[in-house]
Image (cartoon, grey):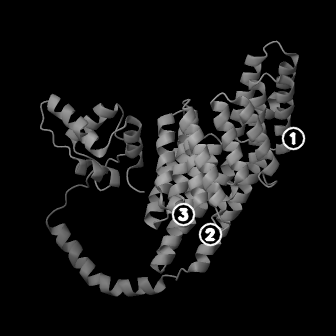
Amino acid sequence: MTGNMRLRLRMAEVGFTQAGLAEALNEWLRAAGHEGTATDRVVRYWLTGKTRWPYRRMRLALQAVFGCSMEELGFLQPPPASPSRTAEQPVNRRSFLASTTAGAAAPLLTSRSTVGTTDAERVRSKLDVLNALDDQTGGTTNLEDSALAAAKQALALQNGAATQRVRNRLFGLAADLTATAAWVALDARQLARARAHLDQALSLAGMAQDSVTQFRVWNTLSMLGYNNRHYSEALAAAQAAQRVGITRRDPLFASLAHARTAIAHAVVGQKQPTLRNLGYAQESLGKAGSEARPSWVAFYGAAELHSLTAIAEDLLGRHEESEAASFKSLATLPQRFRRNRALVTARLALAQVHQGDIEQGCASAEQVFTLMDGGPLPGRLRSVIGDFYRDLLTAAPDARSAYEWGDRYRTEWS
């Protein structure tokens, strides 16, 4: 799915169809004394990116209906027009091009290097290394910068002579690497940077016709909405992930999309949709085979589904079920996912404190620092530990163990 993602999410948040938005705009236009000229086709042009900057009257209507700026709706203002030229200049320019193109084009084309599958594989190997490092350490600025540099390299290779298949592969790699940068920024809780990277990644994935990376972007957007507390956006993005083509072909991706949708329902206390989507996620995962998949999705399996279940159950106030799911996750989580193991352990501590088990919760939270082995805690992990300490003091404001835990680990945590 390509085009204006922000407008699509805003429409989903408000509940507008294309026709519904057109009618709302026409009501505003007529109330302002103008003719109602919005149609569902006009809205479709905005969504697909065919129209990137509506005319002034429609811009005013859009900002009034949604209550936000055009930029927040995903529209891009075109650059100012260049100064007008004299009549002779275009003629002279055409004459110059006609006289020089024939002589210059041949050397230019023959000097272009040929780009093939081997070049794309070298870039892909960098992606695999970055994903492996992320599994160990979590989000760091170095990882983010490295992912963006590799994406830039993939795009630079487009300057060479290549088949359309290789070009699509390079666009797909650039999209995947940019999505990796977005994920790293999100893990570091640099949410504005993550949003910018995701916008770019979705555009590149559309050029590549890469539904796997489109899925990845929507999945990460759902997480971003959750972290920003834009819960309707989190739900809309998770549901968009369910509609991407790869979810119909691969039940593992379908399972992850259902699990992410469950989180979006749970955070607003919708119990039945949450449990229903968790059931769908479990059912789909049971159908998933062991075929080769991109390295970024290697984290998802039974252990991660148990981890997401633990989050959803805790959000619903079902703390015993959350604790049980966390233990199941830790029992099946591969050792190489050190950061994920620390996150699950932190959420286990949360579930235990929510049940009033203060001593056990503190003991579980201590293990987070042991697991990270003195390394810096990514922003997302620091945030969960912050939630733990806040809830610990709320549950047991007079408990000595709560203050001892804070005194002992505040430096490592911050």
State the SS at label 1. Answer: helix
State the SS at label 3. Answer: helix
Indicate the position of residue 248 as horizontal and vertical percent values.
51, 61
Q: Which residue is mark 3?
A: 174
Q: Earlier in the sequence, mark 2 or mark 1?
A: 2
Asked whether disc 1 touches disc 3, contact meaning CB atoms under 8 Å apart, the reply is no
| Label number found at residue 12 | none
Q: Using the numbered discs, state the Cα–Cα distance from disc 1 to disc 3 in whole angstroms.
A: 36 Å
Indicate the position of residue 303 as horizontal and vertical percent values.
73, 50
Q: Does residue 270 appear anywhere in the picture?
A: yes
Q: Earlier in the sequence, mark 1 or mark 3?
A: 3
- Amino acid, disc 2: Val
Q: Which residue is mark 1?
A: 370
10 Å neighbourhood of mark 1: few (<14), some, or many (≥20)? few
Could you say which quadrant of the image residue 330 lies in?
top right
Could you say which quadrant of the image residue 34 lies in?
top left
Quadrant holding the N terminus: bottom left
| Label number found at residue 123 | 2
Could you say which quadrant of the image residue 404 lies in?
top right
Indicate the position of residue 368 as horizontal and vertical percent values.
82, 38
Q: Using the numbered discs, state the Cα–Cα distance from disc 2 to disc 1 in whole angstroms.
A: 34 Å
Q: Nearer the viewer, residue 7 or 114?
A: 7
What residue sits 50% from the left and 52% below the top?
A: 242
- Amino acid, disc 1: Thr
Q: Does residue 156 appear anywhere in the picture?
A: no
Q: Residue furthest top?
A: 398
What residue sits 66% from the left and 62% below the top?
A: 295
